[in-house]
Image (cartoon, rainbow, N blue to C red):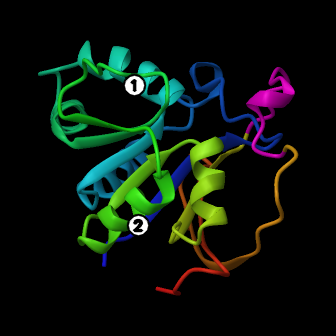
Amino acid sequence: MGKIVNATYLTLDGDISNMMDWHFDYFGEQAQKAATAQLADADALIMGRETYEGFAGAWSSRAGVDEFADRMNNIKKYVVSTTLTEPEWTNTEVISENVAEKVREIKESGTNLLQYGFGDVSRLLLEHGLLDELRLWLHPVLSGKAQPSELLYRDTQQAKFHYNGVEVHDTGLLILSYTPVNAARP
């Protein structure tokens, strides 16, 4: 059985969308090692269309720059979308219907999935008991500019979690790990 891990980068005020303004000030050597290990543990990525479009442009332009970029470009990608029909980013498959069932099949095949960010796909995974771990990369900064749609903390169904642990970095970045109550504990 595979595992689905969500890695969400956020600020103290819950901003998950304006990373260019705050992320890189806290992304030191420890974070690079953690991010590399996290990606190395994944067999594939899962994302929504908006994340796909942002990642495809950003990572495609970095092909050949370093091992992390090459891994992002070459890893299998699943995109949940009803509007994306012809993905151009390497090794991408679109899931447009029966999403929970298809993701369950992928997971049951032994595939470890990594998801970046938190949105509709994350909520669907939680709702269907498919998410195994939530990793919050908490940055010690108040963004002060996120719109309601750019916040982790917005109207959503209640979900409870078990605390797994925290990784503290010299930059003040914390990586908090949680398991949804409805998922198997590690």
Residue 160 appears in view: yes
Residue 9 appears in view: no
> Which disc is residue 55 wearing?
1
Across and down, in percent, residue 105 comes to 33, 66
Callout 1: helix, strand or loop?
helix
> Of discs 1 and 2, which sits in the foreground?
2
Across and down, in percent, residue 156 comes to 82, 51
> Which disc is residue 104 wearing?
2
For the N terminus, the image quarter is bottom left
Q: Is residue 42 left or right of residue 164?
A: left
Asked if residue 178 is positioned above or below residue 183 in the image, the reply reads above
Q: Which residues are magenta?
A: 141-153
Asked if residue 88 is positioned above or below residue 30 in the image, the reply reads above
Q: Is residue 15 left or right of residue 145?
A: left
Q: Looking at the image, tell me whether mark 1 or mark 2 is earlier in sequence order.
A: 1
**Residue displayed at 74% across by 34% down:** 15
Q: Give the farthest residue toward the bottom.
A: 185
Q: Residue 142 magenta-drawn?
A: yes
